[in-house]
Amino acid sequence: MRILSEAHFPELPNYYRGKVRENYDLPDGRRIIISTDRLSAFDRILTCIPYKGQVLTQTARYWFEETKDICPNHVIGYPDPNVVVGKRLDILPVEIVVRGYLAGTTGTSILTLYKKGERDMYGIHLPDGMRANQILPQPIITPTSKAFDGGHDEPLTPTEIVDGGLLSASQWQTLSTYALALFARGQEIARRRGLILVDTKYEFGTDENGTIILADEIHTPDSSRYWLADSYAASFEKGERPASFDKDFVRAWVADRCDPYKDEIPEIPAELIEQTSKVYIKAFEAITGEAFVPDDREETPRARIRTNLSDYFPKT
């Protein structure tokens, strides 16, 4: 009853369903973005996690407020705990990841590339002799192509971005300045919370005037890697991964029982789903320093959202 698995409202125009979010483009240039509780992995939806959508929306809200002096963001308002109304943007074709540590598991992460023997990546040279999870001399930007067509992201250098016409030199300068400043603010606040902001992803777009604006989400548990600061030194010395908000119980459980890219997903135990929900809530409280208050008004989250979005329905 307290899970938001979908949020399709036929009264709202220009519906687009993403893996996790439901989107509506209004005629006046605003976009309604509803974060559901769907959990996506392996290019499919695995299950739903209670309150996940509210956690992500409210975590991003906290950070948008904490960083609005650094750069403009797309937020216009929050009519519901799961909903942000933002300015519709043309998303730039470069995904920005800022990294403060030699970490990561994906094919484009600097640790993966470093282990393969690469030292020059993303237009940056890393020295020999570094260890997994070691702090970098300074945070770096590791941009990738943004695969809108379902393809794979590919590493880019600033020269490739500008010479290839993905961004102008001026746009790249603005983007990189914003990204490093946002990351510095994130690390500063995380440090005060006893956390380490290890790396994070940013998405930017341009408005009708060509102004670069921060979009999507910022510093959430889904877009960022956080470590618990008091575990870092000992873990690093032992060569172990520092303690973090490990939300991947469901992903690991599924991967241990089937080929998640081909097989039917087995039924996921309720206790595993509940455990994951608690981790998301714990992450929200640790990151923001605020208590999580679930919004359980009305019979279901969907009914509550419908009520809160009624002002956006066309008047008949």
Image (cartoon, rainbow, N blue to C red):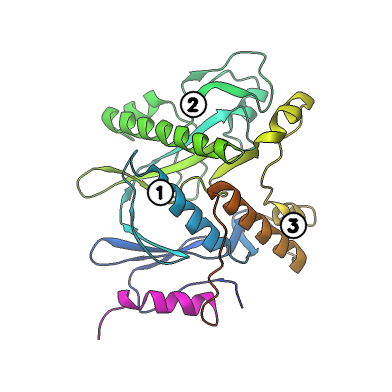
Q: How far apart are the alpha carbons under marks 1 and 3?
A: 34 Å
Give x and y (percent) for residue 268: 74, 65
> Which residue does the numbered mark 2 point to in the structure image?
140
Q: Which residues are magenta?
A: 300-316
**Is residue 269 at all visible to an observer of this figure?**
no
Circle on res. 64: 1
Q: Amino acid at mark 3?
A: Val
Q: Using the image as rendered, state which of residue 188 and residue 279 is in the foreground.
A: 188
SS class of the residue under badge 3?
Answer: helix
Camera-nearest label, 2 or 3: 2
**Residue pictured at 52% horizontal, 42% vertical:** 152
Q: Amino acid at mark 1?
A: Phe
If you read the primary sequence from the N terminus, does the residue marked by circle 1 or circle 3 appear first? 1
Quadrant in the picture for the C terminus: bottom left
> Which residue does the numbered mark 3 point to in the structure image?
254
Q: Amino acid at mark 2?
A: Ile
